Amino acid sequence: MADIIQLLPDHVANQIAAGEVVQRPASVVKELLENAIDAEATTIKLIIKDAGKTLIQVIDNGKGMSTTDARLSFERHATSKIKTADDLFHLNTKGFRGEALASIAAIAHVELKTRQEQVETGTSICIEGSHMVSQEVVVTPIGTSVSVKNLFFNIPARRNFLKSDTVELRHVIDEFHRVALAHPKVHFLLYNNGSETFNLPVSNYRQRIVNIFGSKTNEKLVPVEEETEVIKISGFVGKPEFAKKTRGEQYFFVNNRFIRSAYLNHAILSAFEGLIKTGTHPSYFLNLTVDPQTIDINIHPTKTEIKFDDEHTLYAILRSAVKHSLGQFNISPVLDFERDSNLDTPYNYSKSTVRAPKIEIDRNYNPFQDSESFKRQTSSFNKRPSDSWDSLYVGLDSKNITPQGNSDMKFEGEASDGSLFESNEQVNMTYQLHNKYIISAIKSGMLVIDQYRAHQRVLYEDFLQNMTVKEAVSQQLLFALELHFSSQEIEIIKQLKEDLEHTGFVFSKIANESVEITGVPLNVPESEVSIILEQLINDVQHEVPNSNFSAIDLLAKSMAKSLAIKTGQILKKDEQEYIVNRLFACKEPNISPANRLIFITVGVDELDKKFI
Ligand code: ADP
Ligand code: MG
């Protein structure tokens, strides 16, 4: 097998953040676990004696090293992971400094055993305080085992400086957790003084968290998902009521690397503002994925601090993603908190095929066409069921659904007071661009709002509220509507029946392959009913299982998607204003129910710059 480790040229080595790698047993644990990950191991065993003071051993089944590499690996700045200074900005590995093994070998008794897959025999090397004691051919399993004994044997001052076993073991376990959380697809085991303390099988992220922190954790997790051009966020935050007095379970991973960031931590705290008591700390387990070129990991020797190119944007996205998740959680009762839907799919028909909608509808119909009736219906609430044409103004009825209308609901949306806008006069300055965006003037410049996403947000919050307070108004149909579905689809409708009824649907019959509907939610046109249900079934089939599956939430999202005015629709001035005003009365005006950005702001200063 080819040798892959090279000594870094001086000019590259000099660019690597200098500093001590080994401060305590936990530092060794971190470096060895990371090497095993970089070696693409699928099972990693950590063995600890006396909190790592006597023994730290990591055994992996990764790709191993050639004999030459095994020897070179203990040299300073010897690494297979980077070659040029430029590589520092395209890192896909945990290590890159080529210093860990050298630093560890300098202050302990180290034994390395390693074998590559295609080679019959392996290599064993013993080094004590940087002195090579032995190198021999051995029989050893594929992969690498590094044991580190008698840490700081040659620096008594440092050895004495170590804390009690309890404290050091705590640090060791913390490092183990960090690496294990970042890699749920790797099987990790931890043996402490001869007994198995953790056995973490390959799993999904949620299960990994639960396996580490205990089964009670499961019900405390609220999923966070967001994907934008600059960052992908996935993971969980703890429900506000489980916030702790001590800062314990707070984890950021950037490209699968545990990092500390007071700034991003602040983004989370601000998302929790008003939801947790001061002095308590929310837990979070968040994975951030960014382009490696946009971060610098080489700013700290232990690689736990990162410099982001655009920290401000990440802050805003992170905060809004977490707020959004908490908002959803607060507003919508979740069907079943206890159930880990990753382990247990609530619906067993997810494999059924999706049928295309059968009923023809006039897609060109513009519900805003008649702006006289638009105004009328926004000001009057008492609609007769027969006013079905009027009901096409879906969600434009503000009386029943303004957030302030219900005292049970907390709407802490920061922009809801309209403070973004200079004055009413300026709010009225809207303009529609390409039948897609609404441009609106604000104090600092202008807003560019995606009309489809904005209206989805408005409808989504309306539906959620209606369903949650269970006060939705139903409009009776003159003739019962019979719709046909497959038996699998009927199952879904049965499961969702109760929630659908809370939105205003009235089912007079649910047969094996058809349903009969006699009432639909106010403002839902009869011609759209079939589409809404098809869409909903489709969404359920594709979105389940989701950790905090909430039928109400899905239904609200699905209906909002079906009924929102679409891209391409021409909007009159008052319609544009209506959407802008309603949007900023929303709890979460920034992101659509599908977690997409609803608007961007363009500052006057940005415009000014373009005119230089
Ligand atoms: P770095 O990880 O920064 O490259 P290290 O001193 O930790 O530096 O390791 C030096 C080199 O030794 C690595 O680049 C890698 O090629 C090799 N190595 C270390 N540990 C392992 C392992 N567990 N399996 C395979 N190769 C390893
Ligand atoms: Mg390393």
Image (tube, rainbow, N blue to C red):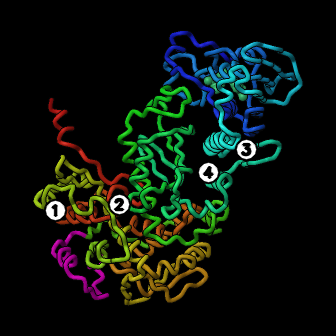
Q: N-terminal of the two: label 3 or label 1?
A: 3
> In this picture, is 273 found above or below 560?
above
Q: Position of residue 322 (x, y in %)?
A: 44, 54
> In this picture, is 288 found above or below 359?
above
Q: CA distance from mark 3 to mark 1?
A: 59 Å
Instruction: Give the image quarter of residue 608.
Output: top left
- In terms of depth relative to the viewer, which is nearer, 483 or 384? 384
Q: Secondary structure at mark 3?
A: strand
**Residue position for label 3:** 187
Q: Secondary structure at mark 1?
A: helix
> In this picture, is 530 found above or below 447?
below
Q: Secondary structure at mark 2?
A: loop
- Magenta residue span: 368-392
Ligand number 1: quarter of image: top right
**Residue position for label 2:** 588
Instruction: Give the image quarter of residue 571.
Output: bottom left
Q: Residues within 10 Å of mark 4 (few under 14, many from 20)?
A: many
**Residue position for label 1:** 573
**Residue position for label 4:** 205
Q: Residue at the spot x=54%, y=9% of the render? A: 10
Q: Position of residue 209 (x, y in %)?
A: 63, 52
Image marks 2 and 4: residues in contact by CB distance under 8 Å = no
Check the picture and name the quadrant holding the N terminus: top right
